[in-house]
Image: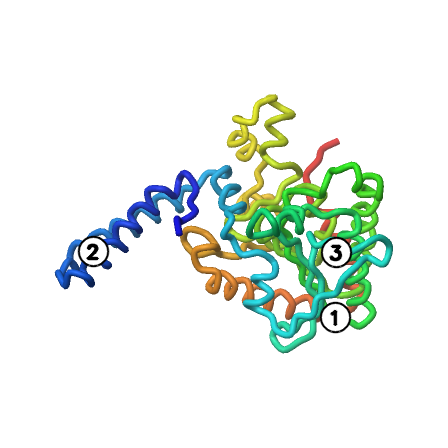
């Protein structure tokens, strides 16, 4: 099967293929080419450091969208146990772009919520490419309130290009559903954490993003608009997307510097898709430490700190 790669990854993939071919040839023909293989492997490591150590914001956006990148259900399987999915918003239906349910994390019961994309065209149509309808946000809020009722912390994984903008979604109150979640999440009397694991696009992300702690994975992005949307508005030209990505300050490092997020979850060299297990372990450690910190606060303290946190984001002058 052909390796899926981004444009800037192609030299790395080509070198990796050469190494695999040499190893296969060595085993088949019983010829010792270990010195040549070691030289190529050293060259590969240097190339990886050069490429992935100097990524542009646009390249990080591309990594955030990589088709092999782990999604919400992948992380749930890797770091949680006994996941039981809960369905429906009790108003209209069950939006499969957002998954919710009970799980055990580090031996403790938690509620977990997250956007879910598909691995192929058929699944993406079912999951709507991770773009939630109003019923998805209403389902998420229903699950958060259940967590509050039973005193369970909530862990949220964000990975969406944005909320679904179709006519049906607007007819069912997309804007109201997101706005309502923003208000209600500020008042949620239980610990709540979110991690942007891929794309964090606009209100689609913020609709489940008002939390006590906000983390962004190293090659994820969190932005008020997609680079393509920004380029279309400012320059009327999609080709300006790399410029828009740089201007939006949407990378994890930018967001950390601006004081918008609480931390960055490190990824292996090359991105989360190259070593999902190691990425999940990094994520597990961050979530464990973060939960231990915020579980110390009373419900009233959590609400006060959450309110102050979001009031403190941004800079303005009069």
Q: In the shown orientation, is residue 3 left or right of residue 203?
A: left
Q: Select label 3 or label 1 by which is in front.
A: 1
Question: Which residue is tagged 2?
Answer: 37
Residue depicted at x 85% and y 58%: 90
Q: In this rendering, is residue 307 above or below 281?
A: above
Determine the residue located farthest toward the right in the rendered image: 91
Q: Between tags 2 and 1, which lies in front?
A: 2
Please say if the residues under marks 3 and 1 sit with CB atoms less than 8 Å apart.
no
Secondary structure of residue under mark 2: helix
| Precedes in sequence: disc 2 or disc 3 | 2
* Mark 2 and mark 1 residues within 8 Å of each other at the beta carbon: no
Residue behind mark 3: 306
Side of 180 where 267 appears, left or right: left
Q: Name the side, left or right, on which 218 lies relative to 168.
A: left
Judging depth in this view, the residue of 259 and 98 nearest the camera is: 98
Q: Which mark is residue 82?
A: none
Distance CA(mark 2)–CA(mark 1): 52 Å
Q: Is residue 192 above or below residue 124?
A: below
Label 3: which secondary element: helix
Instruction: Nearest to the eye among marks 2 and 3: give it.
Output: 2
Q: Residue 249: horizontal and vertical position, in percent? A: 57, 38
Disc 2 crowd, CA 10 A, few/some/many (<14, 14-19, 20+): some
- Residue carrying label 1: 152
Q: Position of residue 194 (x, y in %)?
A: 66, 57
């Amino acid at each position: 099967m052909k390796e899926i790669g981004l444009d800037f990854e192609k030299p790395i993939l080509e070198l990796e293929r050469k190494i695999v071919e040499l190893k296969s040839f060595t085993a088949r023909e019983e010829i010792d080419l270990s010195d040549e293989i070691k030289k190529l492997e050293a060259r590969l490591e240097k190339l990886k450091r050069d490429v992935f150590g100097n990524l542009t914001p646009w390249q990080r956006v591309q990594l955030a969208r990589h088709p092999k990148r782990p999604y919400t259900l992948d992380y749930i399987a890797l770091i949680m146990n006994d996941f039981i999915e809960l369905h429906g918003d009790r108003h209209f239906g069950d939006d499969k772009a957002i998954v919710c349910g009970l799980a055990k994390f580090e031996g403790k019961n938690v509620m977990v919520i997250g956007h879910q994309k598909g691995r192929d065209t058929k699944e993406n149509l079912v999951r709507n490419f991770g773009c939630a309808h109003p019923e998805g946000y209403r389902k998420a809020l229903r699950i958060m309130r259940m967590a509050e009722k039973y005193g369970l912390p909530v862990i949220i994984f964000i990975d969406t290009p944005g909320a679904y903008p179709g006519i049906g979604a607007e007819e069912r109150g997309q804007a109201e559903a997101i706005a309502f979640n923003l208000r209600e999440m500020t008042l949620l009397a239980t610990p709540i954490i979110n991690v942007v694991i891929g794309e964090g696009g606009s209100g689609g992300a913020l609709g489940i993003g008002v939390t006590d702690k906000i983390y962004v994975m190293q090659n994820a992005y969190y932005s008020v608009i997609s680079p393509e949307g920004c380029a279309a508005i400012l320059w009327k030209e999609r080709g300006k997307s790399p410029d828009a990505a740089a201007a939006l300050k949407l990378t994890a490092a930018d967001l950390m510097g601006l004081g918008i997020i609480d931390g960055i979850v490190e990824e292996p060299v090359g991105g989360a898709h190259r070593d999902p297990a190691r990425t999940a372990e990094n994520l597990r450690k961050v979530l464990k430490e973060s939960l231990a910190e915020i579980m110390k606060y009373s419900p009233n303290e959590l609400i006060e700190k959450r309110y102050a946190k979001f009031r403190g984001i941004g800079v303005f002058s009069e």
